[in-house]
Image: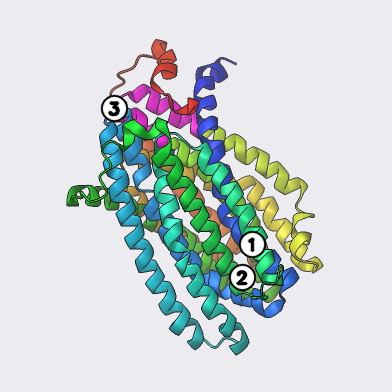
Amino acid sequence: MTFFKKYKTYYNATTRLAYPVMISQVGHPLVGFSASIILGHFAGTVPLAALAIANGFFNLMLIIAIGISYGITPLVARENGAGNYKECGRLLSHSIVVNVLTGLMLLIVTWLGGQYLIAHIGLDAAVVAQAKPLLVLLGLSIIPLMLFLSFKQFAEGLGFTRLAMQVSIWGNVINIVVGIILVKGLFGMPAMGAKSIGYSAIIDRGLMAVVMAAFVLKTQRFNKFLQGCRPFQFDAVRFRKILATSVPIVLQNIFEISAFSAAVFIVGIIGARQLAAYQIAMNYLSFIYYAVNGIGTAAAIQTGYFLGQAKVYLLRASALASYHLTIVFHLVTGVLLLVLNGVLPKVISVDPQVVSMVGNLFVIAAGLEVFDGLQVVSLGILRGLGDLKYPVLINLAAYWGVALPVAFLLGLHTPMGLTGVWLGLYSGLLMASVLLYLRFRHLANRHADNVPAEQENLFNNVLKLESQ
């Protein structure tokens, strides 16, 4: 009880910051999940296959886009903590430029992929015919998405996390409704097949960008932060500062997610049913991964805020509280995976062998997925501390130096098969979580405590984020 009382205030503040981000983050896999259901039920096999091909390419663009946009959040949190409110506005104007230019470059890459790459990898001609225009439309949706993320990450850096949650919820509803209307050809509209998903993404992300921008620019609570926002006054120093934060975040994400994507080819060698089971398990676990990112974002915001205030004791305590909440979150999700391991797979597959394999993967994930959550939160904390180079190296070593080689050996050179691949991937997550936590402890111990333990109630005075 004494332990709980010590961290109670931090638990409350972190939860208030994290839960809106968790809900809005879950929107990312939900969009793909709902699109698959819409096309699978209303359009047929070929459009669904076209979506799978388009998403396989576009998801990499999405990872880069989201990673670039994350760079502003810890910077804004730090300047807010230091009381440099005008600098927050200057960072916003520079971030918009960085994000829009990134969106344009990703649009070009996506267009090239749609026009040239997928047409020359031996796919069915009917699938390619629908995948090409879909990929171009998804590429166009990156521009409004980057505008939305510019204002979303700015607001979250200041502690305003609930609006993004509300916008994301309504955005997902609009995406699903518009997708159904277009794919079925309701209200006199022509049935558009796979392209309906692309058009619904453009409409949905465009509306989200307008609403988020209007809220930030027109709401009084942001006025003091926007005084430094000058749309046409830029300098190279701030661009470098944002990119110095954003690019390592992108690399961290790419090293992890690409390893799990590369494991698909290892599983594919083992067998088709194993590949189906792997994909189903990853679909469900992606919801847990994106949800725990909410705690990681809250940890980054609080760490940056307290670093700006030079409140090292509060920084450590809030970081440890984030770890505690992550463990509790994964205890809950672990129980759900155990209880529902025979139910959830049947939502997607009716093959009893596939369902059994997914259930076995869920049992392993119930005990080991916590390491994924801990490494996500550690990355958030280190992001708030401005430590970016070492996490990139740790992720590279953990996922490409350990996870994939172990998955290859256990999966293809032992009788373990799919289970071996699964355990190999978790060995990388275990390594990353331990090394990233040790990195945090090392950095935290370099700072002398400048807030004594008996002044813990200062938290209520210095952290105004939870009330926003």
Q: Nearer the viewer, residue 240 or 43?
A: 43
- Badge nearest the viewer, 3 or 1: 1
Q: Secondary structure at mark 1?
A: helix
**Residue 106 figure quarter:** bottom left
Asked if disc 3 and disc 1 are in contact, CB closer than 8 Å, the reply is: no
Q: Residue at x 28, y 42 (%)?
A: 229
* Left or right of 356 in this view: 193: left
Q: Nearer the viewer, mark 3 or mark 2?
A: 2
Viewer-nearest residue: 369 or 319: 319
Q: Earlier in the sequence, mark 3 or mark 2?
A: 3
Mark 3 → mark 1, Cα distance in angstroms: 43 Å
Chief secondary structure of the magenta portion? helix
Is residue 160 at least partly visible in the picture? yes
Element on which disc 2 rests: helix
In the image, which disc is placed on residue 178? 1
Q: Position of residue 184 (x, y in %)?
A: 71, 71
Q: Quadrant of residue 65?
A: bottom left
State the separation of the CA atoms marked 2 and 1. 8 Å
Q: Which range of residues does the magenta coloring cover?
A: 301-322
| Crowd rating for badge 1 (residues with CA inside 10 Å; few <14, some 14–19, many 20+) | many
Considering every residue shown, the one lying at the far top of the view is: 454
Q: What's the residue at 41%, 39% (across, down)?
A: 218
In contact (CB < 8 Å): disc 2 and disc 1: yes
Which residue type carries mark 3? Answer: Gly
Q: Is residue 75 magenta?
A: no
Quickly name the residue at label 2. 196
Residue type at tag 1? Val
Residue at which label 3 appears: 83
387 vs 20, left or right, is: left
Distance of label 3 from label 2 (alpha carbons):
46 Å
Is 17 or 366 nearer to us in this picture?
A: 17
